[in-house]
Structures are given as C-alpha cells and as structure tokens.
Image (cartoon, rainbow, N blue to C red):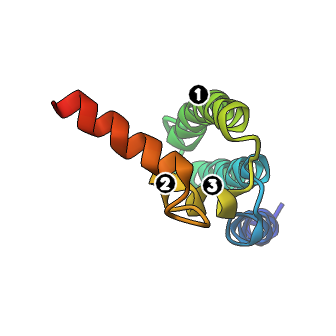
Amino acid sequence: MHLAYPAVLSALLFCTGLYGVLARRNAILVLMSVELMLNAVNLNLVAFDVWLSKAARETLHSGQALTLFTIAIAAAEIGIGLAIVLAVHRNRGTADIDRLRDTAEGHGPGGDGPDTDALAAEKAEATA
C-alpha cells in the first residue's frame, strides 16, 4: 500500500477532530474529538513506521511503540476528562462549555445576584 492513502485518511480524521474541538459546545463531544485527533496521529505513526521499515532492514519499530504510549495516555486522559465532566455536570447541571465559561468564578449573568452577596459575606466572616 502506498503511503499517501493512510496519510490522507489521517489528515481527514485530524481535520474532523479539529473541527469537533472548535465547533462543539458539549464537553463530551469535545473529548471525543480529541480522541479522534489522537487516533489520526496513531495512524500516521504506524504508517510511517511501516514505510521506514521497508528502507532499513533492522528497525526498532519506534512508531508502533509511540502508538502504544499514545493509546495509554489517551485512555488516562479520557478517564480523567469524563470524571471531571461528570463532576461539573452534577454541580452545575450542564456540560455546555459556553455556559460553564460564563458562570466561572461568579461572572455569570446578573453578576450581582444574591449568590455573590452570600459569597462576599462568607469571605468577610472568614477573614474576620
């Protein structure tokens, strides 16, 4: 098989994942898009490893070893990422990234509501 086929497929997968990261609002879909990008990198690593092993007789297959490390890192990333998303969804009731960004650190809509007054009173009592 020619090297161009997996390289083009990898580029398409990576661009699809990049679009998913930039355009999606849901945190779980963003994590899935990141996984798609990592899989595109894995495909590239294996394809170039096979292509380079044809040139040299004795190789260490470093592309395949790096792919195993990438898979392990991706598994850890998705486990921790999903745990964070579930914890945020339990606390705030949404996994929408734009709404989470707007409500971070009390800068939500209506900025001077009763919640911010209660937080200010708690901070004043803690410092006194």
Identify the secondary structure beneath mark 1.
helix
What percent of the width, then of the height, locates residue 127?
A: 17, 33
Instruction: State whether residue 74 is above or below residue 46.
Output: above
Amino acid type, label 3: Leu
Q: Provide the residue designation for mark 2.
A: 106
Q: Which mark is residue 119?
A: none
Q: Residue at x 49, y 35 (%)?
A: 60
Q: Residue at x 74, y 47 (%)?
A: 95
Looking at the image, the residue that sits furthest to the left is: 128
Amino acid type, label 1: Ala
93 or 97: nearer the viewer: 93
Q: Quick one: label 2, few (<14), some, or many (20+) residues within 10 Å?
A: some
How far is the residue under mark 2 from the one under mark 1?
30 Å
How far is the residue under mark 1 from the one under mark 3?
23 Å
- Front disc: 2 or 1: 2
Q: Provide the residue designation for mark 3.
A: 100
- Front disc: 1 or 3: 3
Instruction: State whether residue 1 is above or below residue 43.
Output: below
Work out whether mark 2 precedes mark 1 in sequence or the reverse, and give the earlier one: 1
What percent of the width, then of the height, locates residue 19?
A: 74, 72
Q: Provide the residue designation for mark 1.
A: 76
Q: Residue at x 62, y 36 (%)?
A: 81
Work out whether mark 1 precedes mark 3 in sequence or the reverse, and give the earlier one: 1
